[in-house]
Image (spheres, rainbow, N blue to C red):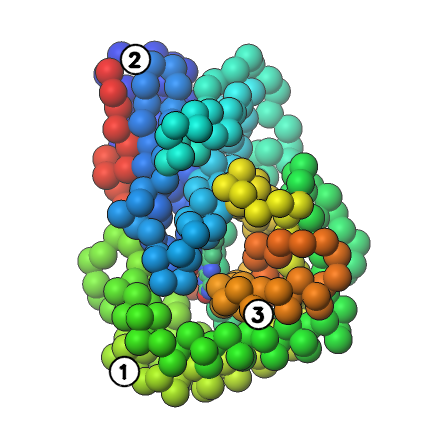
Amino acid sequence: MPVLDASRDPRRQILINAVAAAVMAPSSHNSQPWRFRLVGDTLELLADPRRHLTVIDPDRRQLVQSCGCALFNAQIAVRAMGHEDVVTVMPDPEQPDLLATIQVGASVITTDAERALMRAIPLRRTNRRPFASRPVALSDTDELFTAARRPGVWMGRLDPDQKRRVGELVLRADRAQYRDPAFRAELGRWLAATGSRRTDGIPFAEKEYGSVMPFSVVRALRSPGLGSEFGKLEQERVEGSPVVTVIGTAGDSPGHWLAAGQALEALLLGATTRGLAAAYLNQALEIPILRRDVTNIIDRGEHPQMILRLGYPVEGVGHPAPRRDLEDVLLIVD
Ligand SMILES: Cc1cc2nc3c(=O)[nH]c(=O)nc-3n(C[C@H](O)[C@H](O)[C@H](O)COP(=O)(O)O)c2cc1C
């Protein structure tokens, strides 16, 4: 255990262990936009505005979603350690960065499902490579969605025509984004070169999408035309993936984004337990007009928050993306 609670209070130690699970969550550009404070018997989850991706995420939607993923991991960790997770979401309107508090509740018996999700936390990885053509049964995605859904959050599997139309939007989004120097500069700041000692950012080898495409950091920074090349590759991946799913919410507030993040991580961990991998196609949601087009294509309510493709990996899982040390994200107040 890397961080110990000097007071030797077992509940505080559970919360510290929960932070170790939380930081393994996925985050946009691996920005890890979270901070934690342990105050008495309460763990606070805070947004870290210094890690805000202002170009692709001006309203902080993905930042809050990423923190929702971390929150879900912390909750599962508390439950896997045999306690209820007592969570208060957005407890103080005066502190918009304080996204949630977690306390250790009464003892409970950990379920097999919770244990399986806990085991999946360090195994889950974003896999941007093509998936095997092996189909994913409808019953499998139905079970995954049922387990991951939360109040106000919906999930759906696209039909072939919807998949094709979303693929076109992904291509249009990539073209538009790579034309924007600010987009390329921001992406360049978060791509970590091979061998780098960075503890955040997307490792270049992962973003490389296998060996199919010579996608280098330098090209990302300099090539406005890369969007077409990259977009076509992503479009093929959308159409060739056994499942494309959209997660959406009934409203579009920080509370909805946090819930979407919790549901996303629940879905990703559930998928991991079944040997499934996932990759994101959120570029189509980062441009307001294209996000509206996605809403029209899926015709089931407003506010799409995430587009994912799911499938069985062809090659094994890649190397894990790095994470910051616990000491860098957790402040123990007393
Ligand atoms: C809210 C959110 C949005 C993301 N959007 C994208 C995306 O559009 N494209 C992509 O390739 N990865 C996306 N990712 C995946 C992250 O890049 C990935 O989680 C991060 O690099 C850490 O790697 P890991 O998931 O393997 O731990 C997203 C993750 C989150 C949580």
Do labels 2 and 3 touch, CB within 8 Å?
A: no
Q: Residue at x 54, y 79 (%)?
A: 171
Q: Residue at x 30, y 50 (%)?
A: 51
Q: Is disc 1's CB within 8 Å of ligand 1?
A: no
The location of residue 95, given as percent across then percent down, is 37, 30
The location of residue 140, given as percent across then percent down, is 74, 54
Asked whether the viewer can see residue 173, the reply is yes
Do labels 3 and 1 touch, CB within 8 Å?
A: no
Q: Residue at x 46, y 19 (%)?
A: 103
Residues under labels 2 and 3: Cα distance?
52 Å
Residues under labels 3 and 1: Cα distance?
25 Å
The N terminus: image quadrant: top left
- Disc 1 on helix, strand or loop? helix
Q: Residue at x 60, y 33 (%)?
A: 114
Q: Is residue 41 above or below residue 158?
A: above
Q: Which residue is mark 3?
A: 290
